[in-house]
Amino acid sequence: MTRNVGYEMKSAEYSQICREEEMTSSELNYLLHACKDIYKPPQTEPKKYNIKKAIKIANDNGLLYQLIKSNSGIYEDIDQNLKLAVNKLLNHHQQYFCRLKKSISEINRILGPDNCLIIKTIYNYPHTTKDVDIVVKDLSGSLDSFLENGHQHTFREPPYKQTVRKDGLLHITLHKCVAWGKVVPISLDFLWENSQKTKFHGLAVQLPSVEVDLLTLIAHIPFELLYFKLGDLLYIFKLSEQADWKKILKQAKTNNWINTLKNVVSIMNGLHRSLYNEPSPIENEIPGYVIKKPKFPLSCPFAVILRAHIEKRAWEKIFSVQQYIKQRLK
């Protein structure tokens, strides 16, 4: 059930809606408490919950490692079969983190940390990705450098993206800019503005600004991912407290997806109210919200996806999006 509600809705009215629709389950509340290092816990911690359901929600949203890390005693509450399954998933996570560190070390060896931005990979909590995404200024030259160092060319999506692989490492995807097909949501000069040099497990890395990180995460939902993951959502809420939203809105307007940005943020604002019974930190800048029952991963409404591609004039992607939605509904 979806409700469009006014920004001035009284907290008592909103609380009534939450009670009627049982907005958050005990398992989701338990998981939110386990993720307090990512964003913040809800007001109350559940005393009863189904640990199997909590583990499934965590795994489906890239938060299993975070859940186990937050409470090592969780093993006391699960049976042997579930424990074996969880251990298998945790081993996969640990292997991923080992390969991620090796991959970043390889990127630094070939390109140097000052010559690329690592995007969509390093957040404020441990999670897995299918590859390491980096933005480079010279796509052709960077690709040649990897090929000269024994990497295989596995995928090309000209003019913006090339992917390479090498045994023992994650796939490394080189980007000229942030783009999905021909959808480019961020100006190239802004992409490199105020980048942050930091350390990741002792390795030098260069990350995008908070504003670029947010623009990338938000644009990824309607233009590629097509759903909201709880881990991403909590990370966005945390970043939003530090961001200059005037810069974000200006970038979205400049790159012709300002209405899409507001539509997606309105859903996130509503989810924040459902999860925490209070306005999100983004509402001061983008006050609209749409109330949805938080069942994650949560599909992005097809109307929002379609309007996003129309606003961006991404005609070549509309058919593929329609086909994806049809398959998802089967």
Image (tube, rainbow, N blue to C red):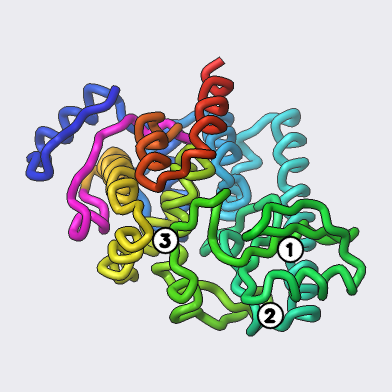
Query: Magenta segment: does it hold 36?
Result: no
Mark in front: 3 vs 2: 3
Q: What kind of element bears circle 2?
A: loop
Give the residue number, with chain letter if any, for mark 3. 214
Q: Is residue 21 above or below residue 105?
A: above
Residue range of the region highlighted in magenta in the rendering: 279-298
**Disc 1 + disc 3, Cβ < 8 Å:** no
Q: Is residue 306 above or below residue 129?
A: above
With 132 as the anchor, is 247 left or right in this view? Answer: left
- The amino acid beneath tag 1 is Leu
- The amino acid beneath tag 3 is Leu
Give the residue number, with chain letter if any, for mark 1. 100
Can I make out residue 90 in this image? Answer: yes
Q: In this view, does 14 lie above or below 208?
A: above
Image coordinates for residue 315, horizontal then vertical, percent? 47, 39
Give the residue number, with chain letter if any, for mark 2. 202
- The amino acid beneath tag 2 is Gly
With 73 as the anchor, is 141 left or right in this view? Answer: right
Mark in front: 1 vs 2: 1
How many numbered marks does the figure carry? 3
Image coordinates for residue 66, horizontal then vertical, percent? 57, 52
10 Å neighbourhood of mark 3: few (<14), some, or many (≥20)? many
Image coordinates for residue 42, horizontal then vertical, percent? 33, 47
**Residue extending furthest toward the top:** 330
With 135 as the anchor, is 252 left or right in this view? Answer: left
Q: Residue at x 35, y 54 (%)?
A: 256
10 Å neighbourhood of mark 1: few (<14), some, or many (≥20)? many
